[in-house]
Image: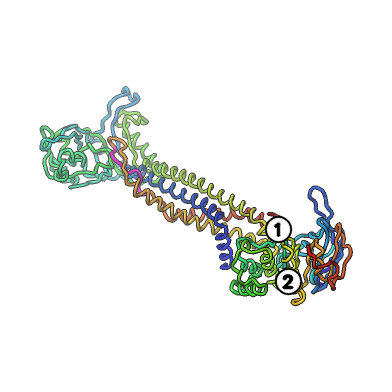
Amino acid sequence: MRELFHEITSNLRNNKLRTALTGFAVSWGIFLLIALLGAGNGLMNSFMGNMADFISQNITVEGWRTSKPYAGYQEGREVRLDEQDVEYTQGPRWSPAVGDVTRQTGSTSVTFSLDGNTVAGQLSGVMPEYLEQNKMKLSTGRFLNPDDLKERRKVVVLSRAQAEELSPKDPEAIVGRWVGTGNVSFRVVGLYHTDETNMYRICPIPYTTYKGIYDSSDKIESITFTVDGPETKDEYEAFEKEYGTAIRLRHDVAPDDRRGIWIRNGYTDNMEMNDAQRIIRTFLWILGLLTLVSGIVGVSNIMLIAVKERTHEFGIRKALGATPAEILKLIIAESVTITAAFGYVGMFLGMIACQVMDKTVGQRTVDIGIDIGNIRMLVNPTVGLDVALEATLLLIVAGTIAGAIPAWKAARVKPIEALRAE
Amino acid sequence: MLIELKGINKTYDNGQPLHVLKGIDLAIERGEFVSIMGASGSGKSTLLNILGILDNYDTGEYWLDGKLIKDLSERTAADYRNRMIGFVFQSFNLISFKTAVENVELPLYYQGVPRKKRHEMAMEYLEKLGLTDWASHFPNEMSGGQKQRVAIARALITRPQIILADEPTGALDSKTSVEVMQLLKRLNQEEGITIIVVTHESGVANETDKIIHIKDGIIGEIEENKAHTAWDSSIIK
């Protein structure tokens, strides 16, 4: 083994250009693969990963406007859910599957003012679980608690962006202060992060407070609840359909009128997101593998030329007593050594490139719309070591095959023909 | 009898069949210093290739050291070449990216001799041929005569039964040619190695003890030449 290694290293050392060319093809292929997968992962983490954060694992039911006539009503009728719907949802028919049920009132536009600064907002009455259900993150202070609801406190949670408008010098200092909205004032109890959410105008206040001040009816904007039981996407969809039909019929809405009463199924959304992620990942892999194929073709090509060029040398070796197996072994071992060594270099450089991407482009944020705020272009654009090693291993296997075909040809040439070759 | 050929026929078929060897019968004793002489196209190189198990023949029998050399697997052929035959070529056939000593070591590599041992042996043979100082030089840094001496060292290192030399002086000037032939003669006399030289030059053939003339694929006259009078050796080339 050591003999063979010595033979190979001396061969490679003495054929520097050939070694360099082959090595470059290999390094480049694996480098591109790693960099591509890294960038792809980064993009995906940025867009899909963040979105997956927003997709809360629960079902939200919201009354809209009917899109088809049903039960004697014309289309275009406004549908509003009410307290009875909440009770119905909590009721025995659904209780095995339905967990916590919360509700949210409609919203009222207000203008907050503090020390002469003003900012627009949408007050909405919510339950304490709202924070978790909407994947909001607090930056300062606290969210609404059950006592706020029980005592109908006039407290509000603002977005950080709003706090910056109202208190430009020290946004955090706004917590604990009272902000005016014309006739009613609210005490700010907390601020939530706005950089990754599209709901920064919504200002949650206790559900009961809202009902007391703005809307004394029993109408509500939406019902949100967790579901426990269904496991597959099909089961979730079946549940959604069954529940949807029931709740729609309660309001004389056609069972299939999705715009009459709209249901957002966070579970299936999440699964669909996972599917999309899988598809993109597969696509990236295919692209990467195609790049790798070009590297393999490069190795194969150079090995073919090298073998042709060395036919005479193999003739000499055969005359001196090299068996066909020896020749085969020599070429394949050379091919594997080159691909392994340079594949490793390419892998290493590719991982460095990923780090560089992370430190440069990855830190840059892009403003892609008013409501979404800023997102980072690439989040963690790296490839796992396992993937990198797999790719390198694949390349080595490919290198063996790439070397095997010309090697087999060379091993079969009769010594006298090989000696005649120039 | 070291080498015995019985009715060897060889036809090349490159589009048009070419009958190169037409029934060769030949016997060479151990320790002989023989030359095979003939014009180009006479079949002398083909004969040498068959003797060297580099090429196969169509009909007949070739016995080498009591073994029938026919339809051998490449593996066995390689083994026989390695252990029984040393080659010296016109164009030296040194591996260009290996140093002199590495070239000499190569046959031992295929015998599986450990590196240190084969390096020692290679150095020993290079010393014998006065090439110690050139051991770590590459072939392109050496003169023709030096290269041929490296090739001879490489042929000798496995202590073969036969040395097959195909136009060993073909690429050398007359002075070096004489030196190389003297070297082969000395090896034959001192070490008792059987040497077969293929040449078209009478001066070279005259250095050997027996001259086998080959013409149009048939053995012609076999000249005993112990006195080296077949040609005036002073006018090689």
Residue furthest front in the image: B234
Q: Residue B11, how many percent across, how many down? A: 82, 55
Q: Could you say which disc has been placed on residue B183 in the image?
A: 2
**Residue A56 seen in the figure:** no
Dot 1 amino acid type: Leu
Residue B90 locus on image (x, y percent) = 73, 61
B101 horizontally vs B35: left or right: left
* Relative height, residue A261 to residue A301 (above, below): above
Chain hosting mark 2: B
Residue at x-position 11% and y-position 32%: A182
Farthest residue to the bottom: give it: B190
Which label is found at residue A419? Answer: 1
Q: Amino acid at mark 2?
A: Leu
Disc 2 crowd rating (10 Å Cα; few below 14, some 14-19, many 20+) is some
Query: Which image quarter holds the N terminus of chain A?
Result: bottom right
Is B226 drawn above or below residue A15 in the view shown? below
Q: Residue furthest right?
A: B221
Judge by depth and name the residue closer to the eye, A124 or B112.
B112
Question: Within the magenta stretch, is there residue A378?
Answer: yes
Distance from Cα at disc 1 to Cα at disc 2: 25 Å
Q: Secondary structure at mark 1?
A: helix
Classified by dominant secondary structure, the portion drawn in magenta counts as loop
What range of the chain is rendered magenta? A372-380
Identify the element where label 2 is drawn: helix
**Pointer 1 and pointer 2 on the same chain:** no
